[in-house]
Image (cartoon, rainbow, N blue to C red):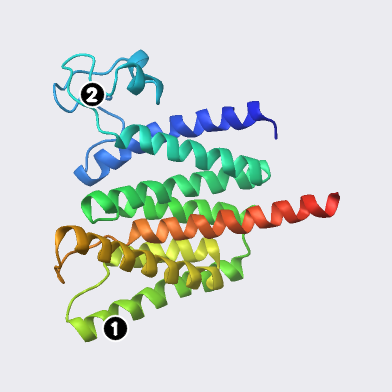
Amino acid sequence: MDWLSIIATFIIGSCVGSFLNVLIYRLPMEESIWSPRSHCLHCNKTIPWYRNIPLVSFFIQNGKCAECDASISWQYPLVEIINGCVWAVCFYIFIPLQAGLTAMFSSVLITLAWIDYKTMMIPLSLIITGICIIVISVFANLLVWQMVFWGAFAGVLIPLAMMGLTYLFTRRQGMGWGDIQLGLIIGAWLGPWFMMIALFLAALFGILAWISISIINGFDRNRPLPFAPYLVVSTMALLFCESWVVLWFDKFLLL
């Protein structure tokens, strides 16, 4: 895959990331994702298409609304950059069909993680979207249905056990039911063994984050911490690291 193709997939991914920003804002508010058109959250003015170009418009306008000069959140370019990079990596590593489905599934995970980080909720509509992508991947022979089944089983059972143990020792619900649903689709995608590793890494990242926050803001044993961002980061790290190792090993054998 040449550099022009990588840049092209990055641009497509960043455009998809612009749509993810709409989902991140509107789904928790239970607003339509189709109407009204994109508008400034401060002055409510509709944003014309030429001022709504992913990444470009934000930097040309110095991160401010062209109408009211209010600051635009850095969330918007960050989501676009992250999603663009993920799409570029997917199409660099995988064959086109697998790359497209993996990129779409990754976009669902990015959206879920960001919404959970901001609102501590996981929209069911995104879980259903993830399930649909998994079903398509099974019919396309990109995922083995037995591994999907056992991965989904592990993705539900292990978080349920973690939630039960947390409640037993602390009398608090350490995880939400949305996390269980997220575990189901991630487990189905990764398979049982990688799902166990992803959960371990997510718990480790969460503990480190909680300690860091406690050092900065003071100790609070009741401080809530969203689990989805850490699970999504662990999942994507495992997915891409495994793929990179296989890719470079294959290239080494061809030398």
Q: Is disc 2 placed on a helix, strand or loop?
A: loop
Q: Quadrant of residue 210?
A: bottom left
Which one is in front, 11 or 141? Answer: 11
Residue ID at (31%, 68%): 207
Name the residue that disc number 1 marks: 165
Q: Amino acid at mark 2?
A: His
**Farthest bottom residue?**
168
Q: Position of residue 208 (x, y in %)?
A: 33, 65
**Farthest front residue?**
215
Instruction: Say which quadrant the N terminus sits in.
Output: top right
Q: Position of residue 19 (x, y in %)?
A: 38, 33
231 sits left or right of 25 in the view? right
Question: In the rendered image of this protein, does residue 248 appear above or below residue 231?
Answer: above
Do the numbered discs 1 and 2 sit on residues whose CB atoms are within 8 Å?
no
Question: In the rendered image of this protein, does residue 204 appear above or below residue 28?
Answer: below
Q: Which mark is residue 39?
A: 2
Q: Amino acid at mark 1?
A: Leu
Q: Is disc 1 placed on a helix, strand or loop?
A: helix
The total number of labels drawn is 2
Question: In the rendered image of this protein, does residue 63 appear above or below residue 244?
Answer: above
197 sits left or right of 128 in the view? right
How much space separates mark 1 and mark 2, taking CA atoms?
45 Å
